[in-house]
Image (cartoon, helix red, strand yellow):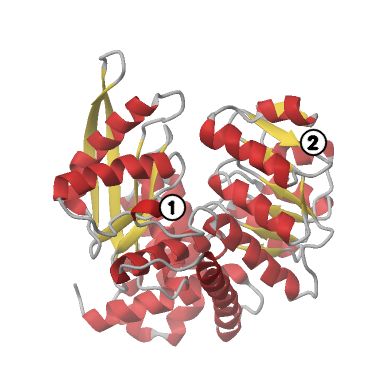
């Protein structure tokens, strides 16, 4: 058995009942097979096995009191996976589905994503099985403060810098940062995604959606194409989806879909800037359900179905797919339907939204495919730029940050193609992203010795 297959087998034995983590490790390790022969020094130092084990996994209880005086207890997590090239960096997810396996999968992916940005950031992830939906601002504040009462012991601007993720937006970051500042009596860049008035960066809310669109544009350009006149499917209705829609519109494309956990909207006329502003008000301010969009804008609403279910069932034409919701939302059948309906490019705004079966369908059909660790790296890239601005005690202009983001996404695209070609996988963005991200971290681990 090969070195990488040995690692996959061992991870499944040592980390049972964590399918998302197994999936992430298998996808990366299979891509790294070409590096084994070229780098015997990595095998000798057992880098492959060391990189799949987190430095530490912190689990803690989060007791808090709701508006009725009822005490609730949730489970909090922070997995600090690898800090070979910089402080641990990765978001916090508040969602009922959160468990240790999901946080480990996200933290593992974050290692390579952060490496690809060229910025000095290690990989980590955290969160809680708390659901902010339906909670008052006061209840969310009480929970965030209770969560930070434990997390503050384990983070710091040069140790571990969390950010937002699903269920954690500007409101939650504000509550957590305010409490961290109170506990530590210091104003530092320990959380990213902060408000502009208190240390945040311009373009940070837009960064993941913009970045995924920029990477898709780079991939399309390899075939002498762009977004002009293209029909685009987007999933999700949160931060990533909102700004993906905005950037696609700016580049001349037409987005026809959006969804949340309850329903999918198909708007064949296209979700223009005015409609996008309605979605932002609905989801960010009023915190309503996406089905309200259908009433307001006379669009099709399908409850209980994902965007990809609806595209498959209704045979909707799509040129570009930009999934921005959650892991494993596109399966093999969805991917086959996308190909059948004309899809030529997929760039993942979410973390691992395509199953292995779906990825195989893309690759077998010559679909341009940008995996999440490359395509959605824009968010953490601008988080890294926020850290830089905090350290320098200054703020860059919107134009400056956007220019740096575009440069980073172009660099990621080039790194993926160069690494893929150098290791015999020409044009394979999955292999290229994994290999390019891995080499930088592996060389740093090698330099440190066995630690």
Q: Which mark is residue 22?
A: 1
Please name whichever residue, 162 or 420, is drawn nearer the observer in this view of the structure: 162
Left or right: where 382 falls relative to 85 = right
Q: What's the residue at 25%, 36% (across, down)?
A: 145
Residue 325: name its quadrant.
top right
Q: Which mark is residue 233?
A: none
Residue under pointer 2: 313
Please name whichever residue, 130 or 243, is drawn nearer the observer in this view of the structure: 243
Q: What's the residue at 29%, 52% (across, down)?
A: 79
Q: Residues within 10 Å of mark 1 (few under 14, many from 20)?
A: many
x, y percent for residue 302 = 73, 28
Q: Are dots 1 and 2 in contact, CB under 8 Å? A: no
Left or right: where 416 falls relative to 98 = right
Q: Earlier in the sequence, mark 1 or mark 2?
A: 1
Measured along the vertical axis of the image, is residue 295 above or below residue 412? above
x, y percent for residue 377 = 50, 63
């Amino acid at each position: 058995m090969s070195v990488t297959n040995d690692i996959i087998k061992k991870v499944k034995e040592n980390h049972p009942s964590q399918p998302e983590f197994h999936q992430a490790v298998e996808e990366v390790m299979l891509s790294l097979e070409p590096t084994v022969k070229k780098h015997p020094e990595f095998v000798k130092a057992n880098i492959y096995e060391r990189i799949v084990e987190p430095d530490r996994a912190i689990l803690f209880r989060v007791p808090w009191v709701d508006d009725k005086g009822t005490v609730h207890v949730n489970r909090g997590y922070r997995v600090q996976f690898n800090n070979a090239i910089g402080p641990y960096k990765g978001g916090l997810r508040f969602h009922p589905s959160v468990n240790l396996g999901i946080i480990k999968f996200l933290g593992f992916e974050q290692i390579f994503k952060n490496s690809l940005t060229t910025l000095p950031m290690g990989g980590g992830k955290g969160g809680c099985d708390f659901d902010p939906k339906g909670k008052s601002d006061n209840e969310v504040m009480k929970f965030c403060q209770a969560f930070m009462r434990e997390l503050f012991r384990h983070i710091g601007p040069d140790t571990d810098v969390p950010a937002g993720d699903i269920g954690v937006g500007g409101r939650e970051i504000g509550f957590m940062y305010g409490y961290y500042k109170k506990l530590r009596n210091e104003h530092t860049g320990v959380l990213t995604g902060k408000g502009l008035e208190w240390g945040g960066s311009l373009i940070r809310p837009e960064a993941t959606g913009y970045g995924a669109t920029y990477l898709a544009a780079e991939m399309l350009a390899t075939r002498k194409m762009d977004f002009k006149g293209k029909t685009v499917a987007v999933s999700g209705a949160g931060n990533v989806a909102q700004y993906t829609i905005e950037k696609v519109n700016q580049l001349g494309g037409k987005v026809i879909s959006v969804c949340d956990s309850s329903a999918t909207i198909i708007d064949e006329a296209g979700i223009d800037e005015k409609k996008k502003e309605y979605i932002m008000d609905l989801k960010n301010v009023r915190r309503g359900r996406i089905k309200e969009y259908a009433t307001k804008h006379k669009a099709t609403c399908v409850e209980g179905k994902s965007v990809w279910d609806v595209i498959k069932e209704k045979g909707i034409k799509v040129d570009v797919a930009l999934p921005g919701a959650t892991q494993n939302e596109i399966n093999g059948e969805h991917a086959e339907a996308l190909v059948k309906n004309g899809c030529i490019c997929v760039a993942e705004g979410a973390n691992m939204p395509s199953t292995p079966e779906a990825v195989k369908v893309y690759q077998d059909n010559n679909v341009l495919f940008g995996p999440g660790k490359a395509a959605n790296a824009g968010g953490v890239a601008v988080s890294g730029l926020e850290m830089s601005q905090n350290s320098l005690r200054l703020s860059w202009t919107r134009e400056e940050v956007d220019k740096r983001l575009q440069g980073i996404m172009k660099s990621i695209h080039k790194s993926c193609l160069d690494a893929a070609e150098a290791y015999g996988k020409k044009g394979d963005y999955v292999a290229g992203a994994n290999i390019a991200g891995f080499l930088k971290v592996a060389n740093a681990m090698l330099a440190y010795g066995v630690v």
